[in-house]
Image: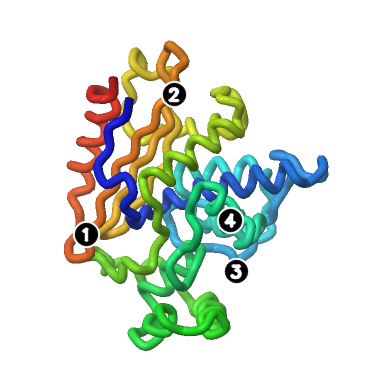
Amino acid sequence: PSTEFNGTTALAIGSTFKLWILLALDDKLRTSNGALSWDSKLALRDEGKSLPSGVMQNLASGSEFALREFAGKMISISDNTATDHLLEFVTRDGAVRAQKATGVNAMPKPGFINTRELFAIKILANDAERALLRTGTQRQIDGLLADLRKRPLQLQDAEGWTKPRHLEFEWYATPHQLCRLMTELGARGQWDANSELLKILGENPGIKIDKARWAYAGFKGGSEPGVINLTWLLQKPDRSWHFVTVGVNDPNQALDEGAIVGLAETIVNQLVP
């Protein structure tokens, strides 16, 4: 049995989009004919660094870490620098293929952006540039994104960002598509909580989990002013699997994120049969 409200309505999902990158990473590992593994190393680059959340932006350029480390930080602490490095590694085409496999045919213009581009669009771009990103040709959009990636971006630039800004520039999915995404990740992990994928998803459950009710909780969420998404893959002690997602968008005012997380925690720990 299932219960849903607006299950086919696409909403901005914030950092929950990183699940597509995790799926694309699994695709790349599976198709590498053994050339790549979770232990393969990736080097940090200054041009790939983003703003927090996360910690990798503070590490020295040239430092190498296993793909497992990048993926773990991307999901468990929503590390934006880890995310952008992995997106470049799997390629945007790879991420789009992962989207399509979960029923998402396309992102609104300007397409599948990375986290630094999102910050730059909302903080550094002017109104004319944002208009071009909405309506321009792909060549114009790609050129502007390349320019935005070169502009200096500091943490203090985001200090005044407390109200919703241009929510059309985001990553969008419906609850049904997020369910397909979590289901695909579960299947890739052979529904084994000790698999690499499900260990990564389960490192940070996002809320206090009732261990008597749930034997496993995989989670990814995301937020920015006006956006919150909280998405779980859950297993009961009887080994049955369940899915929960809660998302809210408000383009006009900041959300009470604490209240929404509290509601979601109640849904997960009390209302799911």
Residue 27 sits in which quadrant?
top right
Residue identified by numbered label 3:
47
Q: Between disc 3 and disc 2, whose residue precedes?
A: 3
The 10 Å Cα crowd at callout 3, few under 14, some 14 to 19, many 20 or more, is few
Q: Which quarter of the rendered picture does the C terminus lie within?
A: top left
Q: Residue beneath label 1, please?
A: 250
Identity, as a three-letter code, of the amino acid under mark 3: Glu
**Amino acid type assigned to the residue bearing label 1 in the image:** Asp
Choose between 21 and 178: the one closer to the eye. 178
> As shown in the figure, which amino acid type bears the numbered disc 2?
Trp
Q: CA distance from mark 3 to mark 1?
A: 32 Å
Query: Which residue is identified by label 2?
Result: 241
**Residue located at (50% from left, 58% from top):** 105
Distance from disc 4 to disc 3, alpha carbons, whole Å, reads 20 Å
Earlier residue among tags 1 and 4: 4
Task: State the SS at label 2.
Answer: strand
Residue 93 drawn at (x, y percent): 63, 61
Q: Earlier in the sequence, mark 3 or mark 1?
A: 3
Q: Nearer the viewer, mark 2 or mark 1?
A: 2
Helix, strand or loop status at disc 4: helix
How far is mark 2 from mark 4, CA to CA?
A: 26 Å
